[in-house]
Every structure is written in C-alpha cells, then in structure tokens.
Image (tube, rainbow, N blue to C red):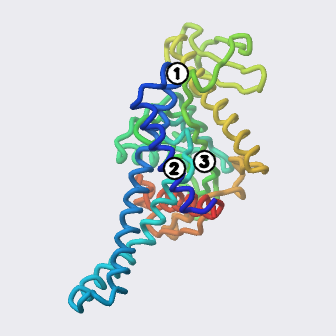
Amino acid sequence: MSFEDKLDMLVRRHQELNDTLSSGKAGGQEFVKMSKEYSDLAPLIEVILEFRRAQRALYDLQSMMADPATDAEMKAMASDEMHELQKKMPEMTKGVQLALLPKDAADEKNAILELRAGTGGDEAALFATDLFRMYQRYAQKQNWKFEVMSISESGIGGYKDATVEITGKGVFAKMKFESGVHRVQRVPTTETQGRIHTSAATVAVLPEAEEVDIKIEDKDLRIDVFRSSGPGGQSVNTTDSAVRIVHLPTGLIVQQQDEKSQHKNKAKALKVLRARLYEMEREKLANERAGMRKEQVGSGDRSERIRTYNFPQGRVSDHRINLTAYNIEAVMNGELDEFIDALIADDQAKRLSELA
C-alpha cells in the first residue's frame, strides 16, 4: 500500500466511524470501542487533512502557472506562493509520517527508575549518586514528581542502589532511552596520586504498570518479612516491617524496607515487581515482532556502556548516536534535553526507514 493510499484509508475509516457513531447503530461495548478508535484517530486525521489542503493548494498554484490565460502579475504571485509551499512540503510530509508511526503504549506511563553501582567500588557508588541527582534535577525541570522508593547507601555516602518513582506527563517516552550502562572517567576524591579511574553504574527505566496491565496471582508470590537494617547491619526498626517478595514463576526478587509500615513496604515492592514483569512482557513481545533479542541493560561492567561522562575533558558522549557535548556540568545539573531529543529523533528515523 502506497503512502497516499494509506492516508486515504485512514480518512475513510475516520468518516465511517463518525457516521456509525452519529447514527446510533453502535451500542454497548462496540460503541465504547469505536469511540476510542475515533478519538485516537482524530489528531492524526487533523494532520492528514492539513497535508491534503497543502497538496491541493500546490496543485492549484501549479495549474494557475501553467494556464495561458493567467496574466504575468498573477503568475508572479502564484510563483512566490508555490515556492514557499514547496519549501514547507518535505517537513509536512515528515510530520504525517511521524504521526503514522505506531505509538508505544507505555510512552504516557509513569516510570520506575532503578540505579545500581557497577564496576568501580566506592567511586561507582558515588557516580550512581551523581546520576540520581542528575535525573532528580531533570525531573524538576520537566515538572515531574520524583519520589524515592528505596536507597541502599555505601559507607562513604554513595548509593549502592536506588529506586525512584517518577510521575508526570510523558515520563517514560523521554526516560526510556536512559536504560543502560553509564561510564564515568575522573579522578576520585579518594585518589592521592591524581590518576583517572573508570567506573560504571547501571540505569534501568521501567514503565509503571497498573493492575490492569499485569495481574499478579497471590499463589505466585512468596512474601517474607524481617527487621529492616541500615548501613553496617544495625537495626533501624524494632518491628518486622521490611518486606521481600519473590515472584516464583520468574524468580524476580524485590525488597523494600524504607517505610516503617510493613503495609507500605509491601505496596511499594508490588509496584516495582509489577513494573519489572510488565517490562519483561514488553520485551518478549518486541523480540517476537522483531525476530531478534533486544539489547539488554548489561551487567554493569565498564566495557558495556551507552554513555561516557569524562570529567577531565568536560565531555559527555552517547555511543549509540555518536553525540558528544562539552558541557558536562550542565548535563550533571539535569540539562539532558540535547541527548534525549537526539535519541528520540534517532529512534523515529529508524522506525521511519522500516516503514519505507
């Protein structure tokens, strides 16, 4: 099916839905289903109709230019308008193509952000803390809510791992490309010889799943409760408020102990478990569709990286799109738009090439 045929088919479908809904012939669940389809199509149809109007205007101007009866003054005006419209058409065409791309159902969801120190000991934990603050500042700039679910600290103030819930508009759509191994090159504060060390931290961004997305059966869970502990193993609470949940079919383990209430810790643990199961299901479907395994986050080893933060040179490099920026202070302060926008554009370009 050609590009133009696809546009015609969508416009016809939108009109058919409009006619059926207006006639009152659809009822019950059919009405609900058709109303949703009609509503989902509406913004795409608006883009298509604008594109069609531009096509018709261009055709009319070309016809006017070719008509011997058109006087010179009118031809000059038509020529100017035609050239302006011709300059806009490639961008309008791309806009329609982007609107036609299948939407990721998870894009509008909130996200669970998981950070873990990888290779590099204490320095890796300190870098994980820096990434935590970077995403916290980015969330603030986006007017998102950044709520800590759990943090495990190292002995010198770094984070061995941290889990955060980020809520707001289009969180997962922007954050999903941050999943992977982030590498840092710098002189650690504990280094007396001034040597540059390389460390790594792993970032995982999961779409937050609702109960309707993932159903978890009680029989599939083993729930253990215990007394929560702080750094060094000392007891934090005097009651068994910490919760560990094991999902028996997959072997996934989630532990929460930050809250004093066992009930709250269990609710948080279930939220993280649901997000992990939802992402596993998404990856399985993506692998089946693509016929190949999606790249995994990795083990946290310094050689498996998606982005490098080189402090001595003041640069940040994203290895997936060969983008390097020499503004490391701004990036660590949450100025991530340059990278995130470029990653989204790269993803769109790849998906457009697949449609061609």
Q: Quadrant of the C terminus?
A: bottom right
Q: Residue furthest bottom?
A: 72
Tag 1 or tag 2, which sits nearer the N-term?
A: 2
- Front tag of 3 and 2: 2
Q: Which mark is residue 312?
A: none
Instruction: Specify few, some or many for label 3: CA neighbours under 10 Å numbering under 14, 14-19, or 20 or more.
Output: some
Q: Position of residue 64 (x, y in %)?
A: 32, 81
Mark 1, residue position: 29
* Discs 3, 1 touching: Cβ within 8 Å: no
Q: Decide which of 183, 20 is in the foreground and name it.
A: 20
- For the point 68% across and 47% down, which residue is it? 297
- Residue, disc 2: 10
Tell me, yes or no, if residue 151 can be seen here.
yes
Q: Are marks 3 and 2 in contact (CB under 8 Å)?
A: no
Disc 3 to disc 1, C-alpha distance:
38 Å
Give the left or right position of residue 218, taking residue 167 as reference: right
The residue lying toward the viewer, choosing from 190 and 118, is 118
Residue type, label 1: Gln
- Where, by quadrant of the figure, is residue 57 drawn? bottom left
Residue hosting label 3: 179
Residue 331 horizontal/vertical position (percent) = 44, 58
- Callout 2 amino acid: Leu
- In this view, which residue lies farthest toward the top? 239
Residue drawn where x is 78% and y is 22% of the image = 249
Taking 237 as reference, is 100 above or below it? below
